[in-house]
Image (cartoon, rainbow, N blue to C red):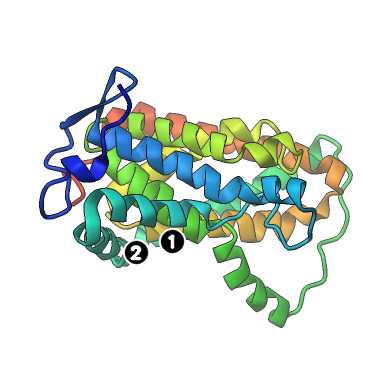
């Protein structure tokens, strides 16, 4: 039996009656939360990957290839509106507007990624990877890159994958288990970049690891914005500045060390805090 109409089984106020409500997809029982999140990831991939199909059918430089970075954010809005209505969108928006988090957390998510980047580059050079000078950048170029780098990853991904996906899934699972499932979904979402050779294949190991770190930040800061800062610091300083010391063919070496650092960080969090990742109370 195929999935029953979602609109037909929603409560009158446009919200699912319970996260434990069961629907059926081809005879397999699924919770409402699982149904929503599966739908979210399918749409996130569809909205992100559509440019590849469009470019294949009608070749043009106008298609967003290999990825449309806004895909997850669009998918989150569509799924929340469809399954939970305006009330669900309002709750999600109020969560996103929680900028207040411990100051130490904001400091940590800026300086620790920066330290990891520098350490990874130093290790890459130490093992013999050829390195050149840092690219000459003026203040104006650094400033222009800030909004570009925010839109190209940190904002749409974290507001959706963690601000929606992680938040909903950890209502049923531990934050650690939820983060690993979300991390797996994010790996699938990155497939066009992995298959196309835009990023090294072992990034597939880094994504679930950093997903654990994001979950730890979220449950301890009760805000998605420290996650955005960490993601931005990694992409901005790593991908757009320090990482450019290496030629394209050699960049995989420093990213290998970067991946190892994030896996180590995730393992330490699991070892010290367990599946709860330090969560003391649910995030509303």
For the residues labelled 1 and 2, the Cα–Cα distance comes to 6 Å
- The kind of secondary structure element at disc 2 is helix
Viewer can see residue 277: no
Q: Residue at x 81, y 62 (%)?
A: 134
**Viewed as shown, does residue 125 lie left or right of 24?**
right
- The kind of secondary structure element at disc 1 is helix
Out of 242 and 25, give the one closest to the viewer. 25
**CA neighbours of label 1 inside 10 A, class few (<14), some (14 to 19), many (20+):** few
Label annotation for residue 248: none
Label annotation for residue 103: 2
Residue at the far bottom in the pictured view = 140
**CA neighbours of label 2 inside 10 A, class few (<14), some (14 to 19), many (20+):** few
Label annotation for residue 107: 1
Q: Residue at x 23, y 64 (%)?
A: 90
Seen in the picture, residue 190 relative to 29 is either above or below; the reply is below
Q: Give coordinates of residue 52: x percent, y percent.
A: 69, 46
Q: In the figure, residue 38 lies in which quadrant? A: top left
**Viewed as shown, does residue 168 lie left or right of 104?**
left
Viewer can see residue 270: yes
Q: Give coordinates of residue 103: x percent, y percent.
A: 34, 64
Q: Give coordinates of residue 87: x percent, y percent.
A: 19, 60
Seen in the picture, residue 200 relative to 13 is either above or below; the reply is above
Seen in the picture, residue 91 relative to 11 is either above or below; the reply is below
**Viewed as shown, does residue 11 lie left or right of 140?**
left
Question: Which quadrant of the figure contains the N terminus?
Answer: top left
Out of 36 and 284, give the one closest to the viewer. 36
Q: In the figure, residue 236 lies in which quadrant? A: bottom right
């Amino acid at each position: 039996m195929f999935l029953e109409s979602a609109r037909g089984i929603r409560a009158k106020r446009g919200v699912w009656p319970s996260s434990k409500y069961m629907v059926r997809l081809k005879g397999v029982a699924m919770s409402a939360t699982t149904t929503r999140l599966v739908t979210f990831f399918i749409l996130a991939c569809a909205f992100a990957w559509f440019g590849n199909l469009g470019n294949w059918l009608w070749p043009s430089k106008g298609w967003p290839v290999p990825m449309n970075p806004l895909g997850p954010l669009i998918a989150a809005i569509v799924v929340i509106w469809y399954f939970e209505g305006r009330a669900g969108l309002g709750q999600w928006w109020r969560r996103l507007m929680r900028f207040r988090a411990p100051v130490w957390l904001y400091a940590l998510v800026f300086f620790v990624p920066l330290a990891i980047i520098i350490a990874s580059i130093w290790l890459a050079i130490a093992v013999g990877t050829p390195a050149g000078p840092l690219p000459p950048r003026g203040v104006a170029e650094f400033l222009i890159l800030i909004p570009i780098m925010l839109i190209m990853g940190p904002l749409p991904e974290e507001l959706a994958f963690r601000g929606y996906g992680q938040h909903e899934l950890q209502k049923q699972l531990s934050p650690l288990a939820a983060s690993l499932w979300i991390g797996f979904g994010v790996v699938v979402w990155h497939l066009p970049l992995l298959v196309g050779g835009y990023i090294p294949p072992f990034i597939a190991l880094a994504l679930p690891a950093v997903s654990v770190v994001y979950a730890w930040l979220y449950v301890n800061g009760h805000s998605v914005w420290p996650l955005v800062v960490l993601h931005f610091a990694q992409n901005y300083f790593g991908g757009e500045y320090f990482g450019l010391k290496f030629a394209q063919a050699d960049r995989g070496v420093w990213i290998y060390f970067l991946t190892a650092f994030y896996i180590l960080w995730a393992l330490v969090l699991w070892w010290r805090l367990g599946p709860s990742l330090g969560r003391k109370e649910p995030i509303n």
